Image (cartoon, rainbow, N blue to C red):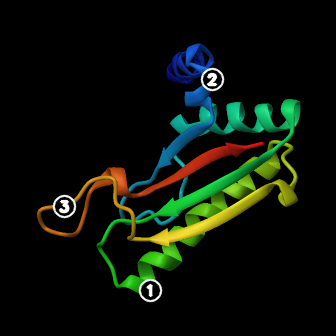
Amino acid sequence: MLLLLLATQIAAAPAAELNRQSIYFDSGKGSDIRPEWTGVLDTVAASVREHGGRVRLDSFSDRSGSHEANRRVSLQRGQTVRQALIQRGVSNASIAIVAHGEGDSLVPTCDGVREPQNRRVDLTLVP
């Protein structure tokens, strides 16, 4: 039911909002995609299959590890999302990953470490 609700919300969103969606990750789980993000992946993949274009995956981490470890986990998250899109019929050549690590945080943190909004992959549709 949650997926249906999420898919309905996405389908009802203005076109500009469909150009960028985000998937969030749990701390300590690396690049595991939670089931509630299936609707976002399905919608983005369907859009690329139907309308062409490319998907840019900007992947991020929080500040809970070293700079290098955070860059590595953000790249792993981007690769996991890319694989999920490929499994949904999107061509590998249509997907670009940019791993930002802990840079470009959505939410500055008081402790400089953990904020769930910073552990994400932004999926942007590019014509």
Q: CA distance from mark 3 to mark 2?
A: 32 Å
The single residue placed furthest to the left in the displayed view is: 110
Secondary element at image label 3: loop
Judge depth for marks 3 and 2 and give the one in front.
2
Q: On the image, numbered disc 1 is attached to which residue?
A: 68
Identified by mark 2, the residue type is Ala
Q: Nearer the viewer, residue 59 or 16?
A: 16
Residue at x 56%, y 63% (from the top left corner): 77
Work out whether 79 lies above or below 49.
below
**First in residue order: circle 3 vs circle 2:** 2
Residue bearing mark 3: 109
Callout 2 secondary element: helix
Vertical arrangement, residue 85 with respect to residue 8, above or below = below
Q: Which of the two discs, 1 and 2, labels the residue nearer the N terminus?
A: 2
How far apart, in angstroms, are the residues tagged by discs 1 and 2?
Answer: 36 Å
Crowd class of label 3 (few under 14; some 14 to 19; many from 20; radius 10 Å): few
In the image: residue 99, left or right of residue 51 = left
- Disc 1 crowd rating (10 Å Cα; few below 14, some 14-19, many 20+) is few
The 10 Å Cα crowd at callout 2, few under 14, some 14 to 19, many 20 or more, is: few
For label 2, the residue is 15
Looking at this view, is 33 or 120 the one in front? 120
Q: Nearer the viewer, mark 1 or mark 2?
A: 2
Q: Amino acid at mark 3?
A: Thr
Amino acid type at mark 1: Glu
Q: Residue at x 49, y 70 (%)?
A: 100
Mark sitting earlier along the chain (3/1): 1
Q: Kindly indicate whether the residue at mark 2 contacts the one at mark 1 (C-beta within 8 angstroms).
A: no
Residue at the image position 58 percent from the left and 13 percent from the top: 12
* Spot occupied by residue 27 in the image (x, y as percentages of width and height): 36, 61
